[in-house]
Amino acid sequence: MMKKMNYEKEYKKYLTSSILDTANNKIASNSFITAFAVYLGLSNFAIGIYAVLDTITNIIQVFAAPLFSKIGQSKFVVLTNYTIYRVSSVCFAFIPFLTQDINIRTTLFFVFASIYAITGELGYITFVNWRMTLVKKEDRTKFASTRNVYKNTLVMIFSLLMGVILDQFTKNGNELYGFLILFFIVFIIAFIDIFIRINTYKPPIEDKAISVKDSVMKPAKDKEFRKILVIGGLNRFAYGMGTMYLNVFLLRYLKLDYLYYSILNILINFADALFSKYWAKKAQNRKWSKVLSPMCLVFSIIFLSLFVLKGNILIYCLPIIYILIGYGNSAYEMFDHIAIYENANEDYKTSYVTFERFIEGIVTAILPIISYWIFPEENNTIKVTFLIAFIAYVIFYGFVKLNKNEKK
């Protein structure tokens, strides 16, 4: 069967679907959905929880490997889950028509958000396995950088449309209709993505029986892999804390209009795309300290600036800050999509990858608890989260420097 598979043709299909998938993840996540949550009237705390919900649900990844080892990774099972995942991302659009009560709106919002996050986590490991099994090792950095360039280009186009459409409809008193148009665009992208995946070759995956115990104990006992776990945990804590209230801070307290807000999202994705090939070269020999050290320094500068700067000075500096965020995101994406998989034990790839996501979920679940203590309903209190992120990235930088002798 493998002999009949056209590698170049299937590589392009995997690349295209991965671009559409990751683009939709960016589109139907913090920036767009947070703007819609603000429109719905959700509280800062609720929006903050939503901002990290997709990472918190990484906790269920530890159960995904045993589940799929039992039910198999058939295209029907995986694509059914993926379809539910994508459809749930547009169900938010129905909320304004169902109720005006903020508590009920919040409940419905989190029902759809939870379905979206959970099905996304369940399907994550299968698509990683398929892609990494099919794509040759020497093509992986090229695949990751190419995907990032096209993904971010697509997101930039959408962000510009978002700003223009929402501003225009808001001026005419029809803000909701602007959001509905954008949800329709998200649905069309998802439909194309699913169609491509249905017609894409699935490489043979050996469904070795895996228990929940194995999914935890095997990677947890691996001393070399613990470094990967610490890196993933530190990054999720620092980045999650720093960005948890960033969008609501921009929209609710700095009161940015949708066009400027969209331009910032364009800049972050432009920078992400621009630096993808740069990080691919840096990661070619798998010396990850060359990627993670500058990333930590940049994020330290970003969150310190967000904490210190105020008023118009901060508003004018936001474009530079968002370009730097894109630079940092591009660096970690390279590590996230390659290092975790390649440092996993060959016989337990699924267990290792899912356990790393499990650790990220546990760490991220702490963030809402911390933020609840801080009560981030006021401008100055939200800024404290930026200070905590700054301190966390300084600690992250120290860890990378102390553990820079990675395996090739």
Image (cartoon, rainbow, N blue to C red):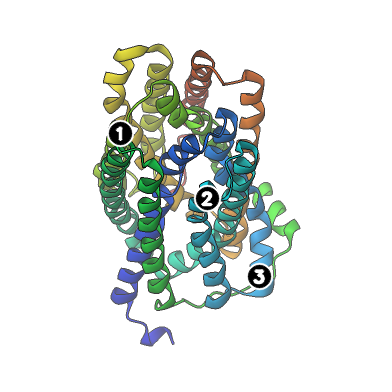
Residue sitting nearer the eye, 279 or 125:
125
Name the quarter where the N terminus is drawn. Answer: bottom left
Q: Residue at x 64, y 68 (%)?
A: 68
Measured from the top left, where is residue 274 in percent x and y? 24, 43
Residue sitting nearer the eye, 352 or 196:
196
- Residue tagged by mark 3? 69
Tell me if label 3 and label 1 are in contact, CB under 8 Å.
no
Mark 3, other Cα within 10 Å: few <14 / some 14–19 / many ≥20:
some
Rounded to the nearest angstrom, the CA distance separating label 1 from label 2 is 30 Å
Tag 3: amino acid: Ser
Query: Mark 1 or mark 2: which comes first in sequence?
Result: 2
Q: Residue at x 44, y 64 (%)?
A: 132
Q: Residue at x 35, y 32 (%)?
A: 325
Secondary element at image label 2: helix
In the figure, residue 317 lies in which quadrant? top left
- Residue tagged by mark 2? 97
Measured from the top left, where is residue 302 in percent x and y? 38, 23
Tag 1: amino acid: Leu
Measured from the top left, where is residue 209 in percent x and y? 69, 70
- Tell which tag, 3 or 1, sits nearer the viewer: 1
Rounded to the nearest angstrom, the CA distance separating label 3 from label 1 is 42 Å
Q: Is residue 125 visible?
A: yes
Tag 2: amino acid: Phe
Mark 2, other Cα within 10 Å: few <14 / some 14–19 / many ≥20:
few
Is 364 situated left or right of 4 in this image? right
In the figure, residue 36 lies in which quadrant? top left
Mark 1, other Cα within 10 Å: few <14 / some 14–19 / many ≥20:
many
- Residue tagged by mark 1? 264
Asked if 100 appears above or below 82 in the picture, the reply is: above
Query: Mark 3 or mark 1: which comes first in sequence?
Result: 3
